Amino acid sequence: MPLTHKKIGVLMGGDSAESEVSIKTGTAILNALTRNHYKAVPIQMGRSICRLLEEESIEIVFNGLHGKFGEDGCIQGLLETLKIPYTGSGVLASALGMDKAASRKIFMQHSLPVPGFYLLRKDQKGDFSTQAVPFGLPWVVKPGQEGSSVGISIVETSDLLKSAVEEAFRYGEVILVEPYISGREVQVGILEDRALGIIEIKTKRKFYDYTAKYVPGMSEHLFPAPLPSDLYQKIMEMGLAGHRALNCRGYSRVDFLLDQNNQPYLLEVNTLPGMTETSLLPEIARGVGIPFDRLVERILSCAIKEK
């Protein structure tokens, strides 16, 4: 049966810190599918998700969720149990992609360079001191399991550490402290187990935070990233290696930092990258001749191929 004849549920919303971004992603996906005559309906993530999927007779789920419960393996496990095909990575890859410390340990096992990091759990917070961190200031403090740069702070002096730690712990039980790397931010788009290209982010902020991502005029995107050809190819290969190391499927976006010597460091693999028409993966795809609607269709097709 052609996919245009199947009932597609576009998951969006939820109550994670990234629900607003998810609604934008889900709406853009829904509009693209509708324009191309797919039988697609919005499905709001919540406690009644199983009932909604059954009432709407959903045959395929296009996962437009971000953050906890949507990007971390939870909804993937539920859909596996219900035997409903879905877009994006499976349970384990999703869980690993959401867990920054776990994924970095895997990247290290695959000889992929990552920034150093110090892991702090909430129950250890009372005993934490700056002397415990094995590298010097400045630091980046971030939640261990969030995306969209939620809860991230740059700590330039030790007196700012307490507030940064408190902010990061608002979003989970584990946080990462890592050295601040001043340099360039580049991201690799992956589709169907192939690296599409690299985009560079130039921001007016100290790093590509939530404001830089979602407030118009706060960042500039350069595609293809203006890098030497050998470095461009190296980062493309590293991005695909990171995607494969977590056993991701369908699509992803792999984020890197380049230091002042152009040494790339793999930060994370986003297993459900933003999918508005102005998001980075669609921008990369558009740059290599894949319009947004076609990108959505190809991602949808992967949900069937993988089953």
Image (cartoon, grey):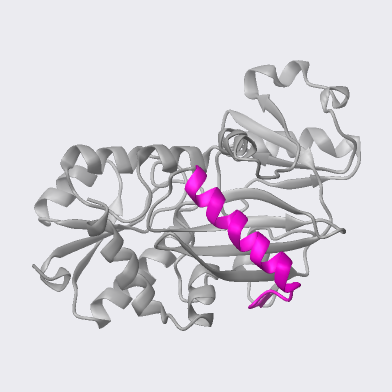
Q: Is residue 9 left or right of residue 183?
A: left
Principal secondary structure, stretch drawn in magenta: helix
The quarter of the rendered structure image containing the N terminus is: bottom left
Nearer to us in this view, 101 or 127: 101
Nearer to us in this view, 305 or 51: 305
Residue 148 shows up from this direction: yes
Q: In the displayed structure, would residue 81 be above or below residue 293? A: above
Q: For residue 72, what is the image quadrant?
A: top left
**Which residue is rendered at x = 39% and y = 46% of the image?**
70
Q: For residue 161, what is the image quadrant?
A: top right
Q: Is residue 31 left or right of residue 107?
A: left
**Which residue is rendered at x = 60% and y = 48% of the image?**
268
Residue 48 shows up from this direction: no
**Which residue is rendered at x = 24% and y = 81% of the image?**
36
Nearer to us in this view, 276 or 169: 276
Q: In the displayed structure, would residue 277 be above or below residue 60? A: below
Q: Can residue 49 be found in the magenta stretch?
A: no
Q: Which residues are magenta?
A: 221-245
* Residue 71: percent from left, percent from top: 43, 46
Q: In the displayed structure, would residue 286 be above or below residue 153? A: below
Q: Is residue 218 left or right of residue 198?
A: right
* Residue 147: percent from left, percent from top: 56, 50
Q: In the displayed structure, would residue 126 be above or below residue 28? A: above
Considering every residue shown, the one lying at the far front of the view is 230
Q: For residue 128, what is the image quadrant?
A: top right
* Residue 294: percent from left, percent from top: 35, 78
**Which residue is rendered at x = 35% and y = 71% of the image?**
296
* Residue 60: percent from left, percent from top: 20, 57
Q: Can residue 231 be found in the magenta stretch?
A: yes
State the count of labels: 0
